[in-house]
Each structure stands twice: as structure tokens, then as C-alpha cells.
Amino acid sequence: MRLDTAVEALWLNRHNSEADMKAARKAFTSAVKDVAAAIDKAEPDTGKADLINLAYQGTIDWGAHPNPRSIHQHMEAPEDIGTHIQVNLTALHPRGSLEYDRSLLACLDFGMLLGLVIAHSLSTISKESVRKLQELNDMKEALLESEFPDAYAAMGPLKG
């Protein structure tokens, strides 16, 4: 989408009509596979492409396929609260429940994955940006390990 605004328009307008939906599906059928392959070509044998493909299959398995309708209709307008931008999402599970906590950690995990994909879409990325992404990932891993030690241990080689 960074290189072709027509592709961006396909994604944003996918719910406008049946024809728009068909065009978007056709355009994005192999998007995840294409991104994973491009990252694997740039950094072979790092396992990043496998993580992207596994994460995508997980979203399908768990019913969380991102699209404008599934995202925008469940968000309140972002609010600047001083030190952060707060975005409230509609949820089906009460705050503090296991599913609520797991969902937040999944969002953080996918955020990290998106950071990786975005980093690969830039022509250059600073060492400072890479360091900050690594720090965020380390914090996420520590949180996962402290809150879900059994699940974390079972993850094995997918950690990090």
C-alpha cells in the first residue's frame, strides 16, 4: 500500500459494494505470503517469515481477520491523555478475565509483528528504532512469562 495508493483504496473501500469486496479479495489473496517471502528474502533463515505465516493462520483460526469493518466499528476515537494516546475497543470479556488479558497480550504480540513488517517496508531503519522494537519485545516476553508461565514454556522455539 505504501507504493500504490490504488491498493490502499481497495482495502479502505472493500465494504462499499460487492464488486469492491471481490476486487479487494483478489488483490490481497496472497498479501501475507508475499510480505513473508519479501522479508525472508531480505533476511533469510531468521524465521521471521514463518512467524508471519503462523500468525496469519492463527488470526484465521481465532476469527480475527483484520479489515476496516472489523476494526473501525469496534473503536472509539483515540483520545490524547497526556503521556499516551488511549484507544478504547469494544470487548466481549470483562476486564481482568483470562480472555481479556490474553486478548491484550495477543494485540501486543501482533503489534510487534506489525512493527517488524513496517520496519521492512522502510528504505532505512535506524539502529535506535531496532533497539526500541527489541526492548518492546523483551518487555512483552517478560509480561507473557510472568502472567502465563505454562503457556510461555509450551511455546518453545517460537519465543522472541
Image (cartoon, rainbow, N blue to C red):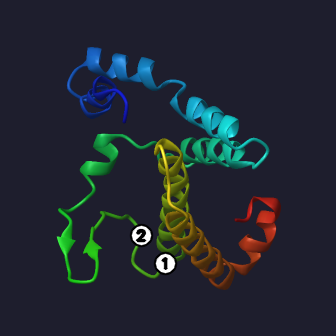
Front-most of residues 159 and 124: 124
- Residue 88, image x, y percentages: 27, 68
Instruction: Tell me whether the residue at label 2 lies in contact with that at label 1, contact meaning CB atoms closer than 8 angstroms.
Output: yes
Location of residue 143 (image quadrant): bottom right
61 to 132, vertically: above or below:
above
Taking the image as shown, residue 68 lies to the left or right of residue 144, namely left
As drawn, the label of residue 111 is: none
Residue at 73% across, 72% down: 152
160 to 61, vertically: above or below:
below
Residue bearing mark 2: 93
Taking the image as shown, residue 110 lies to the left or right of residue 50, namely left
Residue at 55% across, 53% down: 116
Taking the image as shown, residue 14 lies to the left or right of residue 114, namely left
Q: Quadrant of the N terminus?
A: top left
Taking the image as shown, residue 26 lies to the left or right of residue 33, namely left
14 to 70, vertically: above or below:
above
Dot 2, crowdedness within 10 Å: few (<14), some or many (≥20)?
A: few
Q: What element carries label 1?
A: loop
Q: What element carries label 2?
A: loop
- Residue 114, image x, y percentages: 49, 52
- Residue 72, image x, y percentages: 26, 50
Location of residue 113 (image quadrant): bottom right
Front-most of residues 53 and 127: 127
Gap between marks 2 and 1, in whole Å? 7 Å
Dot 1, crowdedness within 10 Å: few (<14), some or many (≥20)?
A: few
- Which amino acid, mark 1? Ser
How many marks can you see?
Answer: 2
- Which amino acid, mark 2? His
| Residue extending farthest top | 19
Front-most of residues 138 and 66: 138
Residue bearing mark 1: 97
